[in-house]
């Protein structure tokens, strides 16, 4: 019988990130995007969506806040589609100059070898590409064709080298079975795919309610991913109103494409606590960088993260505790996935 | 067969080379990460070198759960014997 979230949590390390001491901060340079992904939390699919770029100076202010007040090690750049932002390279150079890692969350439509080299030169650490079969991209009808597109990006990153690659996709009851197709692909490409993220499909825009037929038990996704990837989870982020799990973490080591094993909860805890002691900051994923020795020996780490974002309950929003993807907007720290609600007047603060 | 002392010396030599310190200065009962700044990536590299030297498979978490030279060497020795 499948374990409940509470039973799972007892065996894992609860990541102690809080609003003002956290591994990550989230910025969005633009709300322009070429795609219309179902469930986009920035409301790009909506008729009243307003596309605009953010001033570079404002983004730099947000980054300063994250470093000085939130103690981040990492800045995630999302959107909208950040490759449409005219000052992206300058933005990444700025983050690099401050000694902070940068992750780019992109649909990669505009990502070619020249652009990737340019971003690498600017100091970008990782690119996390959102590809799923519901994006209405040309030629992408199912998960197999989506994997062919993903494979092209794997080859691009192998050619360029020195920059990490991740993939992100949302999961609803419509594509839950695809985990069995995705897992072998990501394991096969574990030499280059550093991060795989599955997010639970939500429709949390103002006035939106998720259709009942898209929901499923989060435990089902947790168990399917564990089985399909043959991994062991090590850590989680909780929710603020109950004992539910928001984020699940696993980090697995592969050697020559063969699984060596996953990090234990104790290992993850020791790595986080030692990094905090030595560097004064939490890590986003252990280890935070790679060595020539490991690459020469064909040893690679692949993280798998599952994210079940906030839900509206009778007691209020059940937020991710210490949300890593918080934005600094109008002097407030807020969860990025609920920004449209906040713009609409709801008072929701990261906790 | 390899001895416990040889494993200890291997670990100390690797840590010393990685951190550019004198291997004689490493206290075998202090955590090599918290006390000497041996990073998680370094620990994984040490694991790979030990595996290749000893021709065994080692658990990936071993290097983060046993953090002193003495503890680590004893655990590795146990796996060699098994």
Image (cartoon, grey):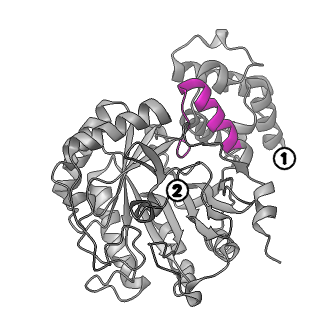
Q: Are marks 1 and 2 on the same chain?
A: no
Q: Residue A232: say if magenta.
A: no
Q: Which residue is mark 2?
A: A348
Q: Is A107 situated left or right of A336 in this image?
A: left
Find residue B37 and report its horizontal and vertical position in percent: 58, 23
The main secondary structure of the magenta stretch is helix
Image-quadrant location for residue A151: bottom left
Residue A235 percent across, percent down from the top left:
67, 52
Tell me: residue A40, above or below residue A22: below
Stretch in magenta: A267-287
The residue nearer to you, when weighing A248 against A204, is: A204
Image disc number at residue B82: 1
Closer to the camera in the image, A77 or B8:
A77
**Is residue A212 left or right of A125 when viewed as pictured?**
right
Q: Nearer the viewer, mark 1 or mark 2?
A: 2
Q: Secondary structure at mark 2?
A: loop
């Amino acid at each position: 019988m499948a374990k409940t979230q509470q039973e799972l949590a007892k065996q894992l390390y609860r990541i102690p990130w809080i609003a003002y001491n956290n591994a990550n901060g989230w910025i969005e340079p633009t709300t322009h995007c070429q795609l219309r992904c179902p469930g986009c939390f920035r409301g790009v699919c909506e008729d009243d969506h307003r596309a605009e770029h953010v001033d570079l100076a404002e983004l730099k202010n947000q980054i300063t806040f994250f470093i000085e007040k939130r103690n981040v090690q990492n800045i995630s750049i999302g959107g909208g589609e950040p490759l449409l932002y005219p000052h992206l390279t300058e933005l990444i150079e700025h983050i690099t100059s401050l000694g902070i890692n940068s992750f780019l969350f992109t649909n990669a439509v505009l990502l070619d070898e020249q652009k990737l080299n340019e971003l690498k030169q600017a100091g970008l650490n990782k690119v996390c590409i959102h590809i799923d079969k519901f994006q209405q991209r040309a030629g992408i009808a199912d998960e197999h064709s989506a994997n062919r597109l993903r494979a092209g990006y794997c080859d691009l990153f192998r050619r360029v080298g020195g920059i990490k690659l991740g993939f992100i996709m949302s999961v609803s009851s419509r594509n839950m079975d695809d985990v069995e197709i995705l897992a072998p692909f990501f394991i096969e490409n574990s030499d280059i795919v550093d991060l795989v993220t599955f997010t639970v499909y939500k429709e949390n825009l103002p006035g939106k309610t998720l259709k009942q037929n898209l929901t499923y038990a989060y435990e089902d996704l947790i168990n399917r991913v564990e089985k399909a990837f043959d991994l062991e989870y090590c850590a989680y982020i909780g929710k603020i109103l109950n004992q539910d799990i928001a984020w699940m973490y696993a980090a697995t080591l592969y050697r020559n494409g063969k699984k060596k094993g996953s990090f234990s909860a104790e290992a993850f805890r020791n790595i986080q606590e030692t990094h905090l002691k030595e560097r004064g900051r939490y890590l986003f994923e252990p280890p935070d960088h790679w060595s020539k020795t490991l690459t020469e020996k064909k040893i690679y780490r692949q993280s798998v993260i599952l994210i079940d974002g906030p839900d509206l309950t009778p007691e209020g929003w059940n937020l991710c505790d210490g949300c890593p993807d918080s934005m600094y907007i109008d002097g407030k720290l807020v969860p990025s996935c609920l920004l449209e609600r906040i713009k609409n007047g709801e008072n929701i603060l990261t906790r | 067969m390899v001895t416990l002392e040889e494993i200890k010396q291997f670990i100390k030599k690797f840590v010393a080379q990685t951190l550019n310190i004198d291997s004689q200065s490493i206290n075998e009962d202090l955590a090599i990460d918290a006390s000497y700044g041996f990073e998680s990536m370094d620990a994984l590299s040490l694991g790979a070198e030990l595996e290749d030297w000893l021709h065994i498979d080692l658990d990936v978490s071993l290097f983060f759960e046993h953090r002193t030279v003495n503890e680590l060497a004893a655990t590795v020795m146990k796996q060699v014997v098994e």
